Amino acid sequence: SAMGLKRLKDLGNYMDFKRKRKKLDVRFKDVSIRNFDGKSDEDYALENFKIEVDLNKYRSGKKIKQEKFGAEFQHSTTKGTIVGFQASLLINLSNFSLQKLEIYPITKAKKEIWNEMVLSVLGTKQGNKKSVIADGGFFAYDNYTRSARQRIVPIINPRSGLEEKVEEKLEEASVNIEWFDSQNSKDLKTLLEEFEEIVGEAVEKSLNYDDFKLERSKIEHIFKIAKEIFGMKDLHTYSKKTALWRAFAAVYVSTLFYQFLERNEINPHRAMGLLSHNKDAW
């Protein structure tokens, strides 16, 4: 049996059996409420971006000597080596609202960022499913299986062999049916079917990642608004704490502004062209 029991010999053996059975019941109840019916059109995007700082602000190096220098040397695809912070942004594409913004060291593992930015914020046991679009830097098989268990559909720019290997990981991650009583087999079957459905949906959408270019372009508009209009460019600070609140304020106001543009059907490029000369908000 699942608990390794062939027969009950005495009271102690029975109490041990009863304790193990309760643990299994709790485990099943915890899992069974997670992934049953519930649909949603909530789409999110997770983006990494760089907050560049102005090296010429503190020529004396006083801030560095006082160990208040939190910025790091980083590589920019357009500028080469820069000094700044690596930030991660989670945004709700359904209404362009800011969900979370955090600054991480460049050595921070992408799996850890995914866990803190996506699973901890959007993961649910019995709520609506949510989709999260992310670039290939977040590609990891664990991100598919862990997300599926928490009703999240990860849409990540794929690498070769995606479908076959994710399906293989799915089989390895499947819950062992022998752990549960036969009376729960119907619920467990439904649970596993939806788990596979979420992973299958994630694989299919990831393989068609280019279909989400329009959604991702809207994120780029928000970044440009934050930099060109609300001052999130060449910040005069090297402190992580100060950079975070300034970036948060700039991105937050930018999301509100973009919502205004969308609601009034105003071209974002035209709006940025008219307002960017007032970009130094700080």
Image: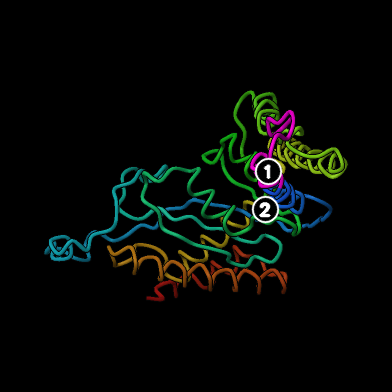
Decide which of 173, 66 is in the foreground and name it.
173
Q: Amino acid at mark 2?
A: Glu
* Quadrant (top left/top right/bottom left/bottom right) for the N terminus: top right
CA distance for labels 2 and 1: 63 Å
Residue 187's image quarter?
top right
Q: Amino acid at mark 1?
A: Leu
The local secondary structure at tag 1 comes to helix
Q: Is 12 contained in the magenta span? A: yes
Residue 225 image point, x, y percent: 52, 65
Q: Is residue 78 left or right of residue 72?
A: right
The local secondary structure at tag 2 comes to helix
Q: Residue at x 54, y 48 (%)?
A: 114
Q: Is residue 54 left or right of residue 13?
A: left
Decide which of 92, 192 is in the foreground and name it.
192
Q: How is the image coloured?
A: rainbow
Q: Residues within 10 Å of mark 1 (few under 14, many from 20)?
A: few
Q: Residue at x 62, y 65 (%)?
A: 268
Marks 2 & 1, CB-CB < 8 Å contact: no
Placement of 216 over or under 247, stated as above or below: above
Q: How many marks?
A: 2
* Residue that mark 2 sits on: 215
User: Earlier along the polypeptide chain: callout 2 or callout 1?
Assistant: 1
Residue 166 image point, x, y percent: 66, 30
Decide which of 206, 234 is in the foreground and name it.
206
Q: Is 277 contained in the magenta span? A: no
* Quadrant (top left/top right/bottom left/bottom right) for the C terminus: bottom left
Q: Which span is picked out in magenta? A: 1-21
* Residue that mark 1 sits on: 11
Placement of 239 over or under 217, stated as above or below: below
Q: Residues within 10 Å of mark 2 (few under 14, many from 20)?
A: some
